[in-house]
Image (cartoon, coloured by chain):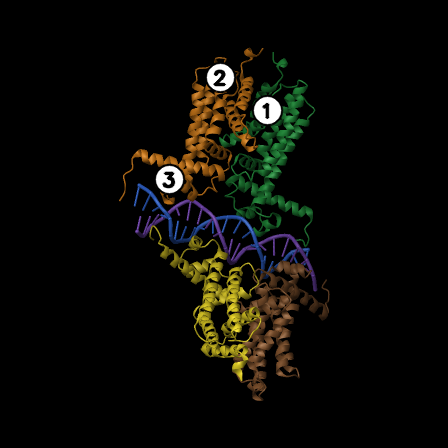
Chain colours: A yellow, B brown, C green, D orange, E blue, F purple
Amino acid sequence: MPKILTLADRQQKRQAILDAAAKEIAHYGYDRANINTIAERARIGRGTIYLYFASKEDVLEALLDAIGKMIDSTVQECLELDAPWQDKIHALASAFAYLAREHQDFFRVHVSALHGVNRDIGQPVAHWLRHSVDLLAEALDNAAAVGSIQRYDAHTLAIMLLGMLESLALLPYVLNHEDDRDEQRADTLAHFIWQGIAPLALKK
Amino acid sequence: MPKILTLADRQQKRQAILDAAAKEIAHYGYDRANINTIAERARIGRGTIYLYFASKEDVLEALLDAIGKMIDSTVQECLELDAPWQDKIHALASAFAYLAREHQDFFRVHVSALHGVNRDIGQPVAHWLRHSVDLLAEALDNAAAVGSIQRYDAHTLAIMLLGMLESLALLPYVLNHEDDRDEQRADTLAHFIWQGIAPLALKK
Amino acid sequence: MPKILTLADRQQKRQAILDAAAKEIAHYGYDRANINTIAERARIGRGTIYLYFASKEDVLEALLDAIGKMIDSTVQECLELDAPWQDKIHALASAFAYLAREHQDFFRVHVSALHGVNRDIGQPVAHWLRHSVDLLAEALDNAAAVGSIQRYDAHTLAIMLLGMLESLALLPYVLNHEDDRDEQRADTLAHFIWQGIAPLALKK
Amino acid sequence: MPKILTLADRQQKRQAILDAAAKEIAHYGYDRANINTIAERARIGRGTIYLYFASKEDVLEALLDAIGKMIDSTVQECLELDAPWQDKIHALASAFAYLAREHQDFFRVHVSALHGVNRDIGQPVAHWLRHSVDLLAEALDNAAAVGSIQRYDAHTLAIMLLGMLESLALLPYVLNHEDDRDEQRADTLAHFIWQGIAPLALKK
DNA sequence: AATGAATGAGCTTTCATTCAT
DNA sequence: AATGAATGAAAGCTCATTCAT
C-alpha cells in the first residue's frame, strides 16, 4: 500500500467498488445488496468502502449518476450526428441496445431505480432523465420547425421515445429472450419510430 | 374455539390484505414494506396474515399475479373488440392509462417488479407478460395476414407495443408531471403507434 | 405468553430490563454496556428490549430518571421530618449511605453520569439534581431565618452538602474500602456538617 | 531512514498528544473520544500515536497519571505551607478551584474517571488518590495530636475533605452555573470546613 | 521515524416469523 | 380463528490498530 494514494489509484479503486456494487445490485436489488458481499467482490475490506463512499446509499447514487450521465451523453452524441433524422433515430436505437448489452449491470440498476418506488433514491436518475428529455425535445422541436419530422408535442414525444428505447433494451432480458437479435430489434424499433414521425411528404 | 369462516369471508379478508400490501409496497418497495404496517392497514393482527399467506414473499406473488392477470385481461378485451385496428390501438392506450390511474398501487408494484432486478420475485410477472405478448403477437400476425396492418416480426412488435404502453403510463409519474393530460398522452401514443403500423395503402 | 399483557406484566418486565441495564452499566459504563448482554441478564431476547425502550440511550435515561427521582424523594422526606436540624442532617447522611449500599448499581450509574462528560446523557440527572438543590436551599434559608442554623448563601451551601453526601457515599467504593463502616462514616459526616452550620449560640 | 530524536523532542510530542487527548476526552468521554481526531488535534499522523503509547487505553492512563500527580502535588504543597491550619484549608480550596479552572480538561477527565464505573481504567486515579488521602490523613493526625484541630478518624476525615474539594470544584459545571464566583465558593467552603474541624478552644 | 490506507471485530437496531393463549 | 408478545438472524457502519512505504 503506497503511503499516499495518487488520484488515479483512488479513482481506480472507486471504480472497482462501483463495478462490484453494480453487479450485486443488478442481481439482488438495492435493499438486498450486501455491503459485505460488495466488498468481497471488489476484493477489499468491509470498512474500505466507507473510505470512498459515505454510505450504502451514496454508492447507489454514484452508480445512478454514472449511468445517467452515460445515457445522457449517448443521447446527445446521437442528436449531434451530422446525418438525416432517420439515421439519428437508428443510431439511438443501436446505442441503447449497445449500452444494455455492454453495461448490463449499470443499465439494470438504472432501470430498476427509474421504475422503482423509492423516489429519494431515484433522484439522480430523474435529474439526468429530465436533462435527456429536454435535449431530445428541443431537437425534435427544431426538426419539426424545418419540416424534417412531423410536429407533435415535443415533450410528450421525447418521453415516449426514451421510454421505448429503454423498454426495448430491457424487455428481452425480462422475458429471458437472451438471444443475439439485439441488432435486429434495434432495426425494427428505428423503422417503427421513423414511420411514426417521418414527415408526411416522404410517405407517399 | 375455531370459528368457521365462509369462503366469502376468507376471500374478503385475503383481498383486504392484498390491498393493504399494494399500498405499502407501492410506497416503499417490497423490501422496505413492513408486514406489521400492512396488518394494521388491513385492520387485522400481525399473525393473521400468515393464516392467509405463507410468507411476505407469497403476498407479493399473489399481488403480482392479480395485477398481471388484470393487465392480461385488459389486453385480451381490447383485442377482441369488434372494431378497426386503429380503434383497438386506441382502446389499449386508454385502458393502460386508466389502469395506471385507477389501480395506481397495483400498477406501480407491477412495473417495479417488471423492471426490478430480482428474477425470482418477478416470476408471476413474467408469466403473465409472456401470455399477453403471445396474445398480442398472434393478433398482430393475423391482422397482417389480411392486410389490416403492416407486417413486422410479430413478437418483437408485440413487446415493443406493450413496453410503450407501460412506459407511457408510468413515465409521467417518474418525472413528476402529475398533471391531468393522461388522456391526451394516450391519444398521442395511439396516433403514433397507428402511424407505425398502418398499412401503407392507407397512408397516401 | 399471555395474549395481552397486563400493565403490571409490562412494568415488571420493564423493571427487569432496568435492573439488568443498571448492573451492566454500573460495571462497564454506558458506552461499553452491551445491549446483548443486558438482554441475557434480563433473560429475554435482544429484540424484546426494543418493545419497552426506544433505544439504548432511552434505557439509560429511564435509569437516570428513576435514581434521580429516588434521591430527590429521599432528600424531601428527610427535610420534612419533624425533628431538630441536627437530626435532619443525620437522617440525610444515613439515607445516602443506605441508597449507595442498597441500590449500588443505580447509584453508581447516577454518579458516573453526574460527573461524566456527556452533557446530553446527563440531562435527567441535572434536572432532578437541580430540583433537590432547590428543595434543600429553600429549607436551609427558612432554617436560617428562624435561627436554627447559621446563615450562608443557601444555594452554595446546598450544593456543598449534596456534593458531600454523594462523595461520602461513593468514595469508599472508589478506594476499595468495602468495609462495614458506612454507618460510622455517616455519623462522622453528620457531626462534621452540623458543626459547620450549627448556630453560634449553641457552641459555647 | 530513521531520524534520531532528542529526548526533549519525544517528550514534547508526547505532551502534545496528551493535551489533545485531554481536550477530546473531556468533551466526549473516553469511549467516544476518537484516536483519529486526537491525532489531528496534535498535528501528527494517526499511526504516530502508537510510537508513543501502546494503545488508546495507555493514553488515558498516562493522562490520569499526570493529573493525579498534579493534584497530589497540590495537596502536598498546601500541607507543607508554614501557616496556621485555617490558612492551609483555605489554600487547598483555592488550589482546587484553580486547577478546575485552569486545567479544566485534565480535571474533568480525572473526575469522570474517579466517579466513573470502569475500575481498570481508574487504577492510576485510585493510586494517586490513595496517596493524597494518606498524606492528608497523616497531617490531620499530627495536627490533632498538638491540638491544632479536633480529633476525628483521620482517614474518614481526609476522604471527606477531598471529596468536598472535588465536588465543589465540579458541581458548578454540572449545574451550568458557569459564573465567576469560584473564589467566593472557595471561601465559603474553607470557612465551612474550618468550622467543622477548628479546636473547640477557639470557638467560644 | 512517520504516515495514512486498509482492515474486520463488534456494535445497535429492524423486522419476518412463531406460537401460547 | 385470531392475536400480538417475543425472538434472533442479519444488516450497515465505526474505529482502534496494523504495516507497507
Same chain for the residues under marks 3 and 2 in the image: yes
Distance between the alpha carbons at the discs numbered 3 and 2: 41 Å
Image side of residue C150 versus residue A5, left or right:
right
Q: Could you tell me residue B135's position as x and y percent?
A: 59, 81
* Amino acid type for the residue under numbered disc 3: Phe
Density class for disc 3 (Cα within 10 Å; few <14, some 14-19, many ≥20) is some
* Residue B131 seen in this snapshot: no
| Helix, strand or loop for disc 3 | loop
Residue tagged 2: D87
Residue in the picture at 66% in, 17% down: C147
* Amino acid type for the residue under numbered disc 1: Leu
Residue in the picture at 30% in, 34% down: D7
* Amino acid type for the residue under numbered disc 2: Asp
| Residue in front for this viewpoint, A20 or D150 | A20
Is D72 rendered above or below residue A155? above
Q: Could you tell me residue C160's position as x and y percent?
A: 57, 26
Earlier residue among tags 3 and 2? 3
Residue tagged 3: D53
Check if mark 1's residue and mark 3's residue have beta carbons within 8 Å.
Answer: no
Is D86 rendered above or below residue B196? above
Same chain for the residues under marks 1 and 3 in the image: no
Image side of residue B84 versus residue D43, left or right:
right
Q: Quadrant of the C terminus of chain B?
A: bottom right
* Residue A196 seen in this snapshot: yes
Image side of residue B60 versus residue B10, left or right:
left
Subunit bearing disc 3: D
Distance between the alpha carbons at the discs numbered 1 and 2: 21 Å
Subunit bearing disc 2: D
Check if mark 1's residue and mark 2's residue have beta carbons within 8 Å.
Answer: no
| Residue in front for this viewpoint, D42 or B142 | B142
Q: Which mark is residue C157?
A: 1
Distance between the alpha carbons at the discs numbered 1 and 3: 43 Å
